[in-house]
Image: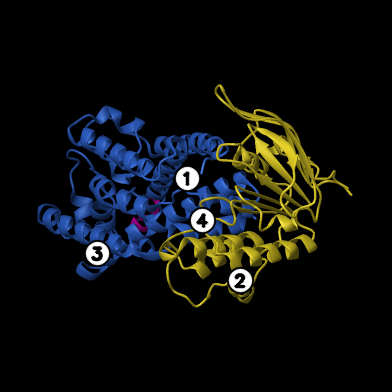
Amino acid sequence: MKPIIEIMHVSKRYGSLTVLEDVSLEIYPGEVVGLIGSNGAGKTTLLRILAGLVRPSSGNVRLGGQDLADDWGTLPVSLGVLFEPPGLLPNLTGLDNLLTLAAVRGQLRSNDVQAWMEKVGLDPRNRQRVGKYSQGMKKRLGIAQALMENPQILVFDEPTNGLDPEAINQFASWLREAQAGGAAIIVAGHDLTQIARVCERVWRVERGKLVPTTLEGVDPATESP
Amino acid sequence: MMERGILIAWRLMFRGWRGLLVIPLMLVVGWVAVGGLLHMGPRYGPANAWDALVFGGVTAQTLALFVAPIFLLATHRDMTKAWEIHIWIHLRSRRIWWGSDMIALAAAASLYALATGLGSLGFGGVTLPVSWSWSALARGRRPVGLSSFVATPQSPPPLVVGLEIVALLALGLWLLAVLTRTLTVLLKSPWLGLVLTWALVLFQYGLVQFGALGILPWMPGDQFVYLMHFMGVGPRIPVEWSVAYGIAWLAILIVVGGAAAHRDWSL
């Protein structure tokens, strides 16, 4: 099996500040990888590079075997992302947010979108605008928009911030479903203890470098198949 | 994917109350158009509905004070929002994301130019006689000062001139909207692009009103008003010049803005 994500010797510098240094990582379809680290360690930068938001200063990123630098701004595979903040339209309802995004690809019908809202614990009939949502509700909606079209790659940055313990457990089960569907998943956070159970490998990001690590109750990081 | 991008861009532009702004624009422009004619009419002869469009609706004044700001506000889309990341990730291409917005803006500019024309014509049709020919007012005016279009037997019929007025205005509005978007992504500011673009239109309008006619061919704004190509004083700018000017700047801005849209994206 070929990796769907290949991060090869990636570095990122902002002026004299080195955020990432010679990072390499391969992720296979159906694999869940965790990234942990403190603020400013470089987790979010790595995820942004992976999603094509930020260019690496050196090194390459391949998605589905295609180098992002070959056609910068074009994604060769389908992605679902959740960053912090989730990036939702505050003046629309939760359902209208999802329907607007679903209309871009046109794969989902209204019923499918409503089902996703219910799945993440939100009421699709709620006419409240997203700007009035609690942090946890926004996060649930953000998770739904990332998952709803079964993308080939899922990128989650701090997905459990603002979620209650029950929702964190649910999130782990949604990840398992996406994993079973063949998605390659990368999850970053300060404390992934509760969802690390679904991660095959966990890496600590320290001063811009990736260090294989273990978490309590989690198997040691192993090499990719 | 391009057609879906255009559809989404259209929805994002005109969602909520901003989608209704075209109605007050039609009312205001129509009102101003007919008011101007009633003021001008007695000096030159009876007007008809076409005069409301040709002489009253699409003028340097209505463009600078009503059409441009309302159009820019209605089509405002903050391309720097984190939300936009989801749009282009779903489209899987920043090029399509940017290009589809440019096409949606062209459609919106055409709609607003048409609405401006129809608002003038509608008010004219209600308050003045309706005819397919030029009025005594249009034939009897004398070329005095700015906006001195006079209908002669060689002039195209009013319907053709009306279509030219609307098409030139649409090109001008498209250019202003693309300038706004490009400034937005270049400056990474949600509203600065809109404010700067309108300020530019007001600035050139003010300069022309104070007699600096030499800048007319070189700035966006008045040169997309058909009447400004028939001035009694100052340089006469061919309509073809303004069309070429608009297309050239559109090409430059679309390329520059597209390049800026491919820069690193901070949340």
Instruction: Residue at 79%, 53% (x, y): give it.
Output: A31
Colour displayed for chain A in the image of the structure: yellow
Residue A78, given in percent of the width and then of the height, sits at 71, 53
SS at mark 1?
A: loop
Label 2: few (<14), some (14–19) or many (≥20) C-alpha neighbours in 10 Å: many
For the residues labelled 1 and 3, the Cα–Cα distance comes to: 42 Å
Q: Which residue is mark 3?
A: B124
Per the image, the residue denoted by label 4 is: B9
Q: CA distance from mark 4 to mark 2?
A: 20 Å
User: Up-down: is A192 above or below B265?
Assistant: below
- Occupied quadrant, residue B136: bottom left
Q: Which mark is residue B80?
A: 1
According to the rendering, which colour does chain B have?
blue
Of the numbered discs 4 and 1, the one sitting upstream in the chain is 4
Say yes or no: labels 3 and 2 on the same chain. Answer: no
Q: Amino acid at mark 4?
A: Ala
Amino acid carrying label 1: it is Thr
Are dots 4 and 1 in contact, CB under 8 Å? Answer: no
In this view of the protein, can residue A105 be seen by the observer? yes
In this picture, which residue range is highlighted in magenta?
B158-164
Q: Position of residue A117 (x, y in %)?
A: 58, 71
- Asked if the residues shown at circle 1 and circle 2 are in contact, with their CB atoms under 8 angstroms apart, the answer is no
Q: Which amino acid, by three-letter code, is at mark 3?
A: Gly
Residue that numbered label 2 is attached to: A113
* Local secondary structure at mark 4: helix
Quick one: quadrant of the N terminus of chain B? bottom right
Host chain of mark 4 = B
Q: CA distance from mark 3 to mark 2?
A: 48 Å
How far apart in space, not on screen, are marks 3 and 4 (Cα)? 34 Å
How far is the residue under mark 4 from the one under mark 1? 14 Å
- Judging from the image, what secondary structure is the residue with disc 3 in? helix
Mark whose residue sits in front, 4 or 1: 1
